Amino acid sequence: MTDTLTTDVAIIGSGVAGALIAAHLAERGLKVTILEAGEEVDRSAAVDRYWSAAIKVPECPYPSVPQAMHPVSDDLDFWYQQTGPNKFASTYIKTVGGTTWHWLGTALRLVPADFELRKRFGQGEDWPISYSTLSAFYDKAETELGVSGDGKADLGSPRATDYPMPAIPQTYLDKAFASALHGTAFDVRSTPQARNSKDQPDRPACCGNASCIPVCPVQAKYDATVHVARATKAGAVLLSKTTVVALETGDDNRITAARFMRWDGSTGSLQARQFVLAAHAIESPRLLLNSSSERLPKGVANSSDQVGRNLMDHPTQLSWALSAKPVYPYRGPLSTSGIENLRDGDFRRTRGAFRIEIGNDGWSWPTGAPISTGADLANQGLRGKDLDQALRYQTSRHVRLASLVEQLPDAANRVTLDSDKRDVYGVPLPRLSYRIDSYVQDGLAAARTAHQEIFGRLGVSEMHHSPDAQGAGHIIGTLRMGSEARSSVVDGDLRSHDHPNLFVSGSAVFPTSATANPTLTIAALALRLADTIAASAQQ
């Protein structure tokens, strides 16, 4: 038997975009239903899974189950059906709250030029909206997520308000970099972060557990369950363990229903006046493509043939070194400072810009330290006090940098449906074609040069550069916004060009990747979209 449910607004996905929109619409009196493929997370159980995991990848607290499969960082062919020529290395999870469970918390704005890449530099695409369009929504997003930052710092993004909370204190390691780089081209600044720098009524201040990725034990770091809870308190209905397998359309091109399957095998259909697709930039195009019909053979919202195209990340140059003096990493949030003044310039005509993240997590990302360091020293024959002394010496000097490089949209970089493999619901697995072009490669090379100079000024006894680009965890661009229906999926208001009651929210709509971690921009766009939907509901 199939259940038939009704609502005003159906929201597919409970990550930061879906949760924000759900909370704001429910609080305005609209009947809202959230459909989430994953289950609710028990925080203490997730922490225990993390501590007991042999391989501490971002997904380890959130095990994949047949009813809610997701990719994993240590096996990029587990869920993704990769056709290359490069591996797409960023992942996501399916839980209530989405991937905000294991995000770092970095809450940077884009810079104004990011919205006009083609106009200013002849590359990529221009956004159909400007920085000024989003400025007030950035202010609101920082309040909603609870961002701690230094309002006086020049990060390249004009602002009219201070941050809701003071900046998270810079670490001893941050200050060592700042001192070594004073007066150079590398301007070390405190990184704005969606984590509490002081106690709030509902969540405590950050106490430096050093496990922001993959789980904050005390919820000082924002995750989208904050807004899921606000939404349900205001009357929204959360349907967890419920996977939407197809969208249905009527003769008037309006979306009429979302067909879903539950973990227990039961099925249903949710009818709504408005639909919001906020299921991340892999699952969202996968759903639209799987919603093909005789009338829409290319899938829903795909008259432009742009659904799934222009897949982007921030390919990351990872470098690590051993400093001459102790800098005492492995304490506090995994990153509290960065170098943001390299994100814009005329060089963007020929290579990707980048921002440099300064890590407090030592060599844990590239080598699995400090556990791997202890193992290496033990394998050298060290024991007892000698092992302890060597371990202290090594780990106190571990430093790493990660440069997140801008990637241009490329129609050949895309998500399609696999022709053979399907999930438990019969939906084809995501098939990924992905290539890192010369624009990115030149940006990665410039990042390595910058890292070498920075480490040289810090004083290091050894230095390493990853030969392969890493994934930043940022999945961008598969349902891009644009002014022209022939070359985009949604318009500047995030409404489908093809279906007047279908909206898309999340980093899938970004026309270009820029360099900033995308979550704050996702949140700003979601808040703007909530206003758009609320206004249309009153008409």
Image (cartoon, rainbow, N blue to C red):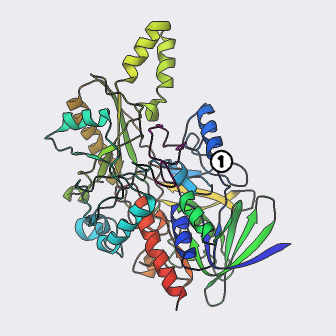
Residue type of the residue flagged with mark 1: Asp
Image x and y of residue 229, in percent = 59, 62
Outermost residue to the right: 1
Task: Return the residue at label 1.
Answer: 42
Q: Is residue 524 magenta?
A: no
Q: Look at the image and say whether residue 208 sits in the magenta stretch.
A: yes
Crowd tier of the residue under label 1, counting other residues whose Cα lies within 10 Å: few below 14, some 14–19, many 20 or above: few
Label 1: element kind: loop
Q: Is residue 425 above or below residue 405?
A: below
Q: Is residue 308 visible?
A: no
Where residue 366 appears, as percent x and y from the top left, is 44, 33
Query: Front-most of 208 and 41?
Result: 208
Q: Percent x, y for residue 411?
A: 45, 65
Magenta residue span: 200-224
Quadrant of res 501: bottom right
Foreground pick, 176 / 363: 176
Task: Answer yes or no: is residue 403 visible.
Answer: yes
Give the residue at x 44% y 38%. 208
**Quadrant where the image shows the N terminus:** bottom right
Image vertical order of residue 19 relative to residue 400, above or below = below
